[in-house]
Image (spheres, rainbow, N blue to C red):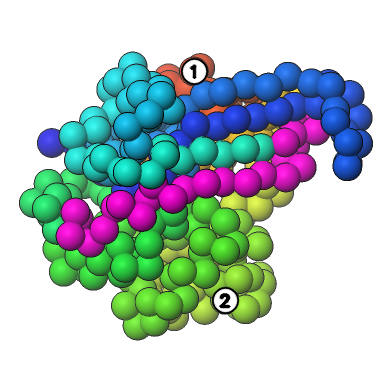
Amino acid sequence: MPRVIVIGGANVDIKGRARGAYVAGTSNPGEVTLSAGGVGRNIAENLARLGLSVALVTALGSDANGQLVRQACAAVGVNLTMAIAAAAPTGSYLAVLDDMGELVSAINDMRAMEALTPSHLDSCADRLAQADMLVADCNLSEMCLAWLCRFSAERGRRLVIEPVSVPKARKLLSLGNGLSAFAITPNAQQLAALAGADGEAAIAKLHGLGIANVVLHRGAAGALASDGTRIEKIEPISVSAIADVTGAGDAAVAGLVCGLLEGRSLAQSARLGQCAAAIKLSSAQSVASGLSRDSLFRLAGII
């Protein structure tokens, strides 16, 4: 049985990177790539590359993009037996990057995820209950997020929630008293959207809503890790040249989960997340092929 089950989005990434200084409102010369992506799928692949047994619960269309995602998952050992077939096209993420690899703008089409419902989660309940950790992204519907919060509380499973984006993070607000999770991993914008504030006051509000642990991802400033009693600053890992920012947050979540499963503290696990993000930032791939348990722990200074 997989140690980690990820429930969330899978799609293809279509990324265009400008070759020179990006100019808005016109066509920019550059390179365009197509690869498997999606927040949930990226987290699952990162975890598999870290040597963990992992399954992905997602929705895929019966199209060429769906086949591309299935092949990418099979290549790294991500189990898709709980994935569901969707009538809609497989999800897609269209991103424009400047010449430094920073995101200029993006559009995602995740209609396929509407096929993933609480009834499908019900059918997977026995397997979900056997996992050491569940990871959910907010590509899921509000009903599925509510189901997972309730399920994890009732079955004593640790649930980590990745908000994905500001609009998708706001789905959590509809859960009210039903919001319950072992950890959440927002960035500053998502934190403000969830808490209506920023900084330590916002983190405290998330704890009050039912989140045991908060790891705030702050990009080049590193992270903050809060267990409700203390907040620890996690320094960023230096990256000499950023190849592509896409997927860095997903890598950070995977590094965090890896550390937690090894019994490390929240702060130590968050540091592993920062190291995983640094490895990703040095790669043009949405998931760095150079990520492994050895490379991660070597960067973190863990023997």
Which residue reaches farthest front?
87
Residue located 62% across and 78% down the image: 196
Q: Nearer the viewer, residue 123 or 291?
A: 123
Q: Quadrant of residue 202?
A: bottom right
Q: Residue at x 49, y 18 (%)?
A: 289
* 12 lies above or below 191: above
Label 1 Cα crowd, 10 Å radius (few <14 / some 14-19 / many 20+):
some
Q: Residue 58: in sight, yes or no? A: no
Q: How many marks?
A: 2
Q: State the CA–CA distance, disc 1 to disc 2.
A: 36 Å
Q: Position of residue 9 (x, y in %)?
A: 41, 45
Q: Amino acid at mark 2?
A: Ala
Q: Is residue 112 magenta?
A: yes
The magenta-colored residue range is 96-121
Mark closer to the chain start, 1 or 2:
2
Determine if residue 110 is in view. yes
Q: Is residue 279 left or right of residue 119?
A: right
Quarter that holds the C terminus: top left
Q: In the rendered structure, are the residues bearing label 1 and label 2 in contact, judged by CB atoms less than 8 Å apart?
A: no
User: Which residue was labeled with disc 1?
Assistant: 289
The residue at which mark 2 appears reads as 195
10 lies left or right of 105: left
Q: Position of residue 118 (x, y in %)?
A: 23, 61
Asked which secondary structure carries label 1, the reply is loop
Q: Residue at x 31, y 57 (%)?
A: 159
